[in-house]
Image (tube, rainbow, N blue to C red):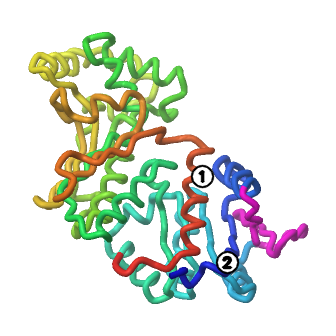
């Protein structure tokens, strides 16, 4: 049987269309023949197919125009703005599907997250945010599909930071010290301007919260998690320059830890582990035996999902960052909005 939305057109507003991901998204939409109905940025917007004139951004007027147009209304938010996310609940309640690339609200307080799920149910529409964990990797959709098809999720493990994967790959086997690996990653543009924003593990932790919630766990809050930081305590509050110059003083502890794990035939990875059965989420360095899928990840992101049926993990692997792959992930979510909402979230 065809879904209820199969013969209806998608009416899509792209919020943040001038940014890197937004530009890639418009290119991808053009490639498949899906024209945007509205283009929105922080100060102005263009509403209507082929509209050339800009008007001040008004999210209430935007939602009214989407609903008036008919079809399946979708707002794709590819900004990093928390203020845009404050409108999600209202849009969903009106029946406007929301596709998001910003992990903020999905890793924030559980109360707000659950309110969004309830709003999507009330509006009989979709709330999709595949790209908040692995850019274009079909991670969240795979996890949701397994749950919807009666799998019991046991664990979800993930290498979720390309930067940390690179650094750990460089220190493996004693090839380089931690400070040398971080310096190289920074020079190659793999890190944030302040590498501590990668090394502190917070980005991985936010993704872990999202994975845990979609795996069915409740009560998971970022504030209550034990997150292992690779930033030495004495260097957490100094300038970037001082951090980079003094990181070498702390190389030995990482080298010793790597050597200890590898002496037993394992490898050290920075990963998130969601243990649904034990209701526990861990983020930090993880010792993995030789047969673990993570040892084949290379520079990629990887998520390994174990269920009651998949006792050997189902693995999703690939590039976890980049404008084009993120845009294709957003577009896949937009297209999914043409289908009926799942029976259970």
Query: Which is more foreground, mark 2 or mark 1?
Result: 1
Per the image, label 1 sits on a secondary structure element best described as helix
**Image quadrant assignment for residue 173:** top left
The residue at which mark 2 appears reads as 59
100 up-or-down from 126: above or below: above
Q: Position of residue 172 (x, y in %)?
A: 28, 18
- At x 67% / y 78%, what residue is drawn? 59
Per the image, label 2 sits on a secondary structure element best described as helix
Q: Position of residue 8 (x, y in %)?
A: 67, 81
17 up-or-down from 10: above or below: above
Which stretch appears magenta? 32-56
Nearer to me, 129 or 283 = 129
Q: Are marks 2 and 1 in contact (CB under 8 Å)?
A: no
230 up-or-down from 3: above or below: above
The residue at which mark 1 appears reads as 328
- At x 37% / y 32%, what residue is drawn? 164
Residue furthest right in the image: 52
In the picture provided, is 80 more to the left or to the right than 244? Answer: right
- At x 31% / y 14%, what residue is drawn? 177
Q: Position of residue 144 (x, y in %)?
A: 35, 65
């Amino acid at each position: 049987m065809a879904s209820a939305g199969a013969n209806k057109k998608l009416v899509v507003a792209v919020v943040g269309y001038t940014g890197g991901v937004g530009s890639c998204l418009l290119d991808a939409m053009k490639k498949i023949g899906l024209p945007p109905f509205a283009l929105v940025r922080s100060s102005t917007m263009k509403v209507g197919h082929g509209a050339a004139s800009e008007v001040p951004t008004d999210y209430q007027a935007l939602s009214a125009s989407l609903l008036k147009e008919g079809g399946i209304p979708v707002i794709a938010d590819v900004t990093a703005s928390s203020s845009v996310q404050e409108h999600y609940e209202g849009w969903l309640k009106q029946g406007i599907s929301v596709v998001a690339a910003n992990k903020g609200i999905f890793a924030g307080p559980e109360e707000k997250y659950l309110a969004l799920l309830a709003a999507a149910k009330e509006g009989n529409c979709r709330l999709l945010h595949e790209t908040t964990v692995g850019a274009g990797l079909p991670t969240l959709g795979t996890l949701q599909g397994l749950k919807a098809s009666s799998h019991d999720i046991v664990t979800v493990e993930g290498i979720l930071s390309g930067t940390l994967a690179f650094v750990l790959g460089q220190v493996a086997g004693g090839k380089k010290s931690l400070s040398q690996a971080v310096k190289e990653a920074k020079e190659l543009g793999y890190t944030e301007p302040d590498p501590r924003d990668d090394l502190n593990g917070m980005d991985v932790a936010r993704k872990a919260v999202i994975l845990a919630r979609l795996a069915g766990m409740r009560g998971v809050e970022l504030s209550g998690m034990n997150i292992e930081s690779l930033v030495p305590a004495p260097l957490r509050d100094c300038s970037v320059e001082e951090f980079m110059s003094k990181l070498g003083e702390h190389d030995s502890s990482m080298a010793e830890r790597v050597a200890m794990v590898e002496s037993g035939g394992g490898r050290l990875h920075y990963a998130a582990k969601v243990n649904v059965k034990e209701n526990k989420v861990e983020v930090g360095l993880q010792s993995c035996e030789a047969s673990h899928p993570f040892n084949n990840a290379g520079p990629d992101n990887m998520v390994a999902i174990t269920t009651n049926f998949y006792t050997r993990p189902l693995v999703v692997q690939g590039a976890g960052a980049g404008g084009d792959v993120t845009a294709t992930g957003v577009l896949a979510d937009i297209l999914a909005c043409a289908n009926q909402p799942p029976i259970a979230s």
